[in-house]
Amino acid sequence: MGMDRKIEKKKGIRLKHIIYVLAGIAFILLVLKIAKDSNVSSLKVDKEKITIEEVSQGYFDDFIRTNGNVQPISTIYLDAEEGGRVKERLIEEGAIVKKGDVILVLENRTVYMDIMNSESNLAQKQNYLRQTRINFENALIESKRLLLNSDFDIIKKERSYKQQKALYQDELVPKEQYLQAKEEYEYAVQLQEINKMKMQNDSIIRVTEMNQLEKELEKMTETLNLVRERLDNLNVKAPVDGQLGMLDAEIGQSIGKGTRIGQINVLTDYKIEAFIDEHYIDRVRRELPATIERQGQMFHLAVKKVYPEVRNSQFKIDLVFTGERPENIRTGQTYYINLQLGQPQQAILVPLGGFFNSTGGQWIYVVDPTGEFATKHGIRIGRKNPKNYEVMEGLKPGEKVITSGYDLFGDNDRLILR
């Protein structure tokens, strides 16, 4: 008879075993999470007292916004070329002036005395030169007279000599008489040569002395002209057309030579002076474009000058209009300027907020998808503009972050939102 065989159950992993394992893993993870959460410092925060923004992907417009003041395109300073006491103040601050207009009249007794002395010295030198010229003319006349007498004497002595020579050859006169006539004639000839040399030398001396006197006279005339220029400089004049912007001089006030007493604003054009945070000093350069808005219209500018000095963590720039100017533009007006540092580029963006002051852009609180809490996340911030920060790493578009200030959060790693 056949025997019944007992069928053994196959051994192996069943579904219920898998469920047990997964449940165990979940339990362990839950325990670990609870343990971890218990070690994380937390702070309860009211949602209504914080600002939550969404991280986005978009174009980062690389510009900064600052305010600037309208200034004249250039300023010409007024310095006193000659010191003196203010006698008259003919033009007041704010007045429009033309080149050459007298603004101030100074008086200086020293300058007046210098002019009188120079004029007196010049007159004396002119009189001396005139008298010297007369003396030289008289001396020249006397020299010519002597030369004429010498010529006449030679003619007589030559005639006598020739007569005595002929008579001596005919033995009609003694030899001594002949020799005397000859010697007198030769002496007259030599005397004439001496008179000619004297006349020539006197002429050279006269010309030299006259030239020297005339040069001295020219120098004295130049000196007098310079002193007269000093007198003219007592009239402080406008060097260019423009507007008298400042005048620091009152009637009766003594002003030293070289003292700055005012300025003239050239109004042929205008510029805008702006101060930029030193953070951007390496990025701001000449010809960078900028815009301002006035009554709904955009006006274009360009950076004309970047000043190298940094004061109070800021440096100054000058901008000029590259096209139309706003109507009724005035010195001292304030405009808000958008200075373009670069071209727009795709980037991950986070709106500006007070969090940056606390974190320096190194981390931020990221809100959990449940919206129940937020935790610290390390990030790296790049550039910023008046609206957004450029996020280089650490965040993804769609994530929500707390952008308001963190001053009240302390060093807590987690914020419980309620």
Image (spheres, helix red, strand yellow):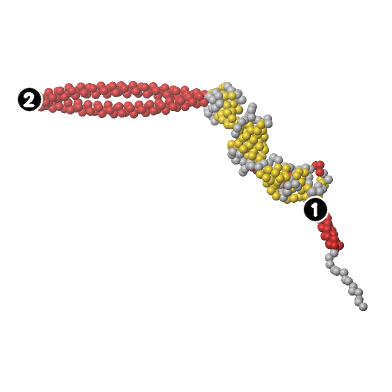
Q: Residues within 10 Å of mark 1 (few under 14, many from 20)?
A: few
Q: Secondary structure at mark 2?
A: loop
Q: Which of the pair 79/269 is nearer the observer?
A: 269
Query: On the rendered image, what quadrant is the N terminus found in?
Result: bottom right
- The amino acid type, in three-letter code, at marker 2 is Asp
Residue at 39%, 22% in the rendered image: 127
Q: Residue furthest right?
A: 1
Q: Which of the pair 69/114 is nearer the observer?
A: 69
Query: On the rendered image, what quadrant is the C terminus found in?
Result: top right
Q: Disc number at residue 40?
A: 1
Relative horizontal placement of residue 9, taking residue 194 as reference (left or right):
right
- The amino acid type, in three-letter code, at marker 1 is Val
Q: Residue furthest bottom?
A: 1
Relative horizontal placement of residue 211, taking residue 231 as reference (left or right):
left
Q: Residue furthest front?
A: 1
Q: Disc number at residue 112?
A: none
Q: Earlier in the sequence, mark 2 or mark 1?
A: 1
Which residue does the numbered mark 2 point to in the structure image? 170
Where's residue 330, x and y in %? 63, 28
Mark closer to the observer (2, 1): 1
Q: Secondary structure at mark 1?
A: loop
Residue at 84%, 67% in the rendered image: 12
Q: Is residue 195 visible?
A: yes
Residue at 73%, 45% in the rendered image: 56
Q: Quadrant of residue 161?
A: top left
Where's residue 383, x and y in %? 67, 44
